[in-house]
Amino acid sequence: MLSLIISICCTVLLGFGFKEFQKRNYSIFSIILLNYFFCSIIGFILIAFSEQLQFHLDELLISILLGAFFILGFNWYAQSIKSNGLAMTTVIQKMSVVVTVIVALIMGDSLNLYQKIAVLLAIIAIYFLTSGDTKVGKMGNVIFLAAGASSCIEILFIYKNKYAENLNSSGMQFTSSIFFIAFLFGLIFMLTKKETVLLKKEIIISGLALAIPNFASIYFLNHALRQQIPGSIAFPILNCSVILISVLVSILFYSEKFTTKKFAGLLLALLAVFIISKYL
């Protein structure tokens, strides 16, 4: 459970990092690409001091898919925000965890009654915490591509830890490979779309600052799944807890409006996390 808590905290830091970058009008694509580069460097340095580099075809193939979805998901998410707005994009993307839960159960996750209730509460809480008072209008296809990428990433992590797990691996090499491949795909995307990476001092520092919690969030998420925490529990609680903490911080420090839906979502999220921690 500690690994999942660390992943949650690091993911929250990522969210507020992006919020600060947007306030300063930094190039988000440049920061993302540099972040992937620094993540892979951090990982390979840690591997050099902790374990031998080993080649596993199954992990490499999953890393390639994850790296591709990291870049595609980011691109679709950015496009969806432009066409559908941040609020609606967040709702649809976060609610895609329903697909993850269904697939995880099909893959063999077994939950007791209390865990099933907690997962259901977490999903409802995610909806309340992200939807606010947004009215559903006509949505472009890209919003569902962004949500699909999010689900694919979660499902690949579950698949890897169920069927392609190397018991001698700490997960460091797998995590590092994901970010390095995401960086390579990012370079290809940059060349094909004629994007420009800004190598200004503040952009480089921002990319490095983002890389530390980003690497930790993925490494400890993978570690939590390796500790046999079912993916059908891990991802709803991860998303629910990240949104819960983010909303609380936004209300306290960013003067975000506290609506009835968010209050209900906070109560449901707290109850879901309590049940999971008690019956895990």
Image (cartoon, grey):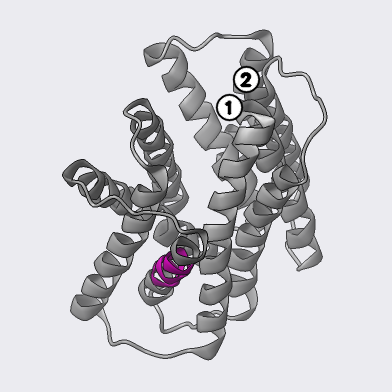
Is residue 224 shown left or right of residue 117?
A: left
Picture layout, residue 105 above or below residue 126: below
Mark 1 neighbour class, 10 Å CA radius: few under 14, some 14 to 19, many 20 or more: some
Name the residue: 45% across, 19% down: 250
Farthest-out residue, front: 194
**Residue 109 image offset from top left, x and y in percent:** 73, 62
Q: Which mark is residue 267?
A: 2
Choose top left, top right, bottom left or bottom right for residue 202.
top left
Q: Is residue 257 left or right of residue 5?
A: right
Residue 185 part of the magenta-drawn span: yes
Instruction: Give the camera-side residue of 83 and 143.
Output: 83
SS assignment at label 2: helix
Q: Are marks 1 and 2 in contact (CB under 8 Å)?
A: yes
Q: Nearer the viewer, residue 241 or 96?
A: 96
The segment highlighted magenta reads 178-188
Is disc 2 surrounded by few (<14), some (14 to 19) or many (20+) residues within 10 Å?
A: few
Residue 126 spot, x, y in % from top left: 66, 32
Q: Is residue 84 visible?
A: yes
| Residue 161 drawn in magenta | no
Q: Position of residue 131 (x, y in %)?
A: 69, 24
Type of the residue with mark 1 = Leu
Residue at the (56%, 81%) spot, across then down: 61
Please give the residue where the numbered disc 1 appears in the rendered image. Answer: 270
Spatial separation of the CA atoms under disc 1 and disc 2: 5 Å
